[in-house]
Amino acid sequence: MVALTSKPHHKDVDDGDTVTDFMAQERERGITIQSAAVTCDWKGYRVNLIDTPGHVDFTLEVERCLRVLDGAVAVFDASAGVEAQTLTVWRQADKHSIPRICFLNKMDKTGASFNYTVESIREKLKAKPLLLQLPIGEGKTFKGLVDVVSKEKLLWNPSSGDGKDFERKPLLELSDPELLKEATEARNALIEQVADLDDEFADLVLGEFSENFDLLTAEKLQTAIHRVTVAQTAVPVLCGSALKNKGIQPLLDAITMYLPSPEERNYEFLQWYKGDLCALAFKVLHDKQRGPLVFMRIYSGTVKPQLAVHNINGNYTERISRLLLPFADQHIEIPSLTAGNIALTVGLKHTATGDTIVSSKSSALAAARRAEREGEKKHRKNNEAERLLLAGVEVPEPVFFCTIEPPSVAKQPDLDHALKCLQREDPSLKVKLDPDSGQTVLCGMGELHIEIIHDRIKREYGLETYLGPLQVAYRETILNAVRATDTLDRTLGDRRHLVTIELEARPTETSSVMPVIEYTEDVSEDLLKTSQEAIENGIHSACLQGPLLGSPVQDIAITLHSLVVHPGTSTTMISACVSRCVQKALKKADKQVLEPLMNLEVTVTRDYLSPVLADLAQRRGNIQEIQTRQDNKVVVGFIPLAEIMGYSTVLRTITSGSATFTLELSNYQAMNPQDQCALLNRRSGLAKVF
């Protein structure tokens, strides 16, 4: 079994109806939003395929799938090479140490260039491509490919629409002198490349085959390519056109041949489980008939229907009622599944994305004990055990938010239910209540993300909701150190609650979303033991709403200088006093608004470069470089998120629909005084009406 992230089966990207794209929005927009798991068998191997999105708003969807994969297929558009989003997903795969194969798709598209794409993989991804295939023709003339390893040519029957009808012939001096020469040169270069990366293969080549590389069998070369792929020192490159299924059969062969099987992937935490069940829930879907469907990757042990399982993250036990094998939107019921597979379970009502599932609480404790016994140093033990047991998913901070209203007050509970279900499926969607207006606020990763959530509430839950205008998630910070003191004195019933506090707020040098909390020696340790949690809760709650815009405060440190608490004072009162004192300090300080700065990449033809640059200059854009990508120019730079609202429509207009762009959060940066002043005036209703 191999799990991979890609779309190499029955692929109709061009028509916008892929087998794995089963949400209505995916077929309409021709993009993948959710990852779908599909199981298929190929020449005696079980392949579990996970198709992940490529759009930047759905990066988390990719992140949570990568951690359950053994290997990946990175799909490139042969006419565009490495794009901005390719780079993001490639870095994510590096982070999770996933061996991969590159597939250059759309070889039959006008402008497709095999050499250009391979060069961009080498240059931009800093990877070592191993050319296992060469195309026969490019663009409209693409009709087949050369298998470099076996020196054979594969030609597809032009009248075969589904790509099943093709012939594999050895390259001969008589019929294909040019192709044979090219293939021999490519094979010799491939052998030298692999020998440089793999010592065992180098010894073999230098010993037995140094005189004539042609005598080296395909099997020996394939074994060596498998080793360097698994070691992640190089990436095999294949090509084809998935629309017509050209090159898909050799791709599936390459997947089974070069990517690792589950046995070859070494997961550290498995040794603690000793064959007991250990699985990771990496996706939750809500089905109208069956309720929540949980996709899980089984690392060890076996899953069966009616099995009670323990969720480590939530510390509760649930029962799996049914076990299904996923095939896009059709599911086959099965009696059991073993390690290395992707299971689809029915009956887990509370499990969320990123939860670790084991057979029982005692099994988890036994694994933790084994992990602790292995830990060499006392202070590292618990962290080590926790790190091995709990495999969560890092959720990026949302950058956009907007209010969402049900059609009537009576529908509010239905909306709450829909949002609760959607949050379990998609942890990058945050929902909160505005304390001032009582409205529900959606926080998401981008315009498309929020638009699709709105669309799904309508289609899947039958609710016609109203979205307020999109707002940018600003942050705030302070520029100087300030001290503040506060006293809270209240008598409730016969108890007197008295707290006096003195603290200092100051900016930190390094960026940190959470406030850094310090205590001076004057604060007694005994008092800290009982009230530290209350103090920190008070500080955190004060930092959720800054004094300028009510946005979260970041990059600050709070030092507690003195704390006097009357005996019998409740912890709630301590929290309230600390919170009020921090807010007082923040109000006194010089304040600064931080705005999200985005990495922007616009791909545009030469003719329209000037209007695009002029428009970006008006939007406070900062251009870093302008690259050339075949006939196009690629503008790379930074732009404040506030200036990019509705940019897709403007870009379409000024370039007659020929340009595309990608956006990604870079960091938060300080606004300049004029822009900050204009923003604050707008927020307080003082903006001039033009």
Image: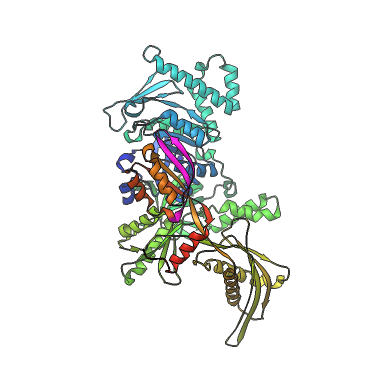
| Image quarter in which the C terminus is found | bottom left
Residue 88 percent across, percent down from the top left: 48, 44
Here the colouring is rainbow
Residue 553 percent across, percent down from the top left: 55, 63
Quarter occupied by residue 603: top left
Residue furthest out toward the right: 521
Range of magenta residues: 621-642
Between residue 257 and residue 185, name the one nearer to us.
185
Residue furthest out toward the left: 159
Instruction: Kindly identify the residue that appears in the image at 60 percent across and 75 percent down.
Output: 577
Residue furthest out toward the bottom: 494
Residue 355 percent across, percent down from the top left: 50, 55
Q: Is residue 479 visible?
A: yes
Asked whether residue 609 is drawn in magenta, I would say no
Quarter occupied by residue 564: bottom right
Asked whether residue 628 is drawn in magenta, I would say yes
Q: Is residue 35 visible?
A: no
Describe residue 486's horizontal placement relative to residue 472 as left or right: right
Residue 618 percent across, percent down from the top left: 43, 51
Between residue 493 and residue 137, name the one nearer to us.
137
Quarter occupied by residue 504: bottom right
Q: Is residue 29 above or below residue 72?
A: below
Between residue 642 and residue 4, name the one nearer to us.
642
Residue furthest out toward the top: 174
Between residue 363 and residue 492, name the one nearer to us.
492
Describe residue 271's horizontal placement relative to residue 219 as left or right: right
Question: How many numbered badges does the structure rendering display?
Answer: 0
Q: Main secondary structure of the magenta part?
A: strand
